Amino acid sequence: MSERIYSRIAGTGSALPARVVSNDELAQRVETSDEWIATRTGIRQRHVAGEGETTVSLGRDAALRAMEAAGVEPGEIDLIVFGTTTPNLIFPSSACLMQAELGIAGCPAFDVNAACCGFVYAISVADKFIRSGDAKTALVVGSETLTRMVDWSDRSTCVLFGDGAGAVVLKADSATGILSTHLHADGAKKELLWNPVGVSEGFKPGEDNAGVRVLMTGNEVFKHAVRALDSLVDETLEANGLDRHDIDWLIPHQANLRIIEATAKRLDMPMERVIVTVDKHGNTSSGSVPLALDEAVRSGKVQRGQLVLLEAFGGGFTWGSVLLRY
């Protein structure tokens, strides 16, 4: 019987734009307030990409920190999976652009677009490569510059989003690592959270296509997210024969503090065991889970051997989880 192979997180990294925009600063642009935003979302500030800061440059910086933490050289990377919904270009992929900047050549490199669930989808794909033996050292990135597609006159959405990136290096390991991943989608709900303009649909040649923006029916998204994540928690625990009290840390997508609190309640988990960065970063889409993971690791909260649940919900709808022994 062949030995089971796991994907172990060997290193984490993150990167944030230099500019920080507070709720008070946003209140000077739209009719809102720090109290209104913080009470409804838990967000106090967000990072906004400036000149020269892109999805690829943030992803590259996060990747370099993850590689340094893992003690891995560029030549050892044999797979790159890049989660993003805001790529630098339509093509080549952000993964290919970052690959070149890192001085890596020859290995597979591709993007995964699952909106806010992009990193969870990406790490699941990389895990499959490692389990099958097709990769031994994978670089997985979640990076976004969502503020470049935000309608700054729409107070219901512009207060929510920020820019940032996180990354992990996965290495094949015979002892421990990712235990299971669980992915779902429901495209029938697309218009509750979406961007209406693309290349093959919504784009009008010769006309102003400034319609690239985030549209969201917030209360409906909230209800669907809570229900989906509730079911996902049960599915993940059942698949691994675990009780909810076995989980050491919950690292959720950082979209809204109320959704995070609802998921923690489902796990009967005190908020002291939940990693929360939404107050500092806002919703960074596919960047949020790896950003929070990197902060949890570097702060010393998450320790080797602990059981960690990653989960996310995003446009599509997409949702998914990763259960791992760190």
Image: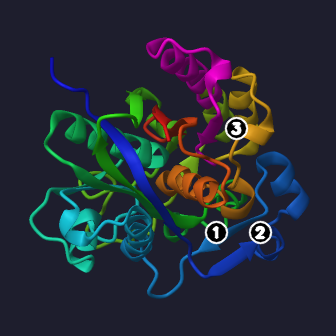
**Magenta span: helix, strand or loop, mainly?**
helix
**Furthest residue in direction bottom, as rendered:** 51
SS for callout 3: helix
Q: Pointer 1 and pointer 3: residues touching (CB < 8 Å)?
A: no
Can residue 243 be found in the magenta stretch? yes
Residue type highlighted by circle 3: Ile
- Cβ atoms at labels 2 and 1 below 8 Å apart: yes
Viewed as shown, does residue 152 lie left or right of 95? Answer: right
As shown in the figure, which amino acid type bears the numbered disc 2?
Val
- Front residue of this view, candidates 223 and 109: 109
The label on residue 30 is 2
Q: Position of residue 15 (x, y in %)?
A: 52, 71
Direction from residue 221 to residue 54 in the image, left or right: left
Give the quarter of the image for residue 56: bottom left
For the residues carrying marks 1 and 3, which lies nearer the camera in this image? 3
Q: Position of residue 315 (x, y in %)?
A: 48, 41
- Tell me, yes or no, whether the highlighted magenta stretch contains residue 151: no
> Dot 2: what SS?
loop
> 53 or 75: nearer the eye?
75
Residue 85 percent coordinates (x, y): 40, 56
Please report the bounds of the magenta region as a residue range.
225-254
What numbered label is drawn on residue 152?
A: 1
Query: Residue 25 falls in which quadrant of the image?
Result: bottom right
Q: Residues within 10 Å of mark 3 (few under 14, many from 20)?
A: many
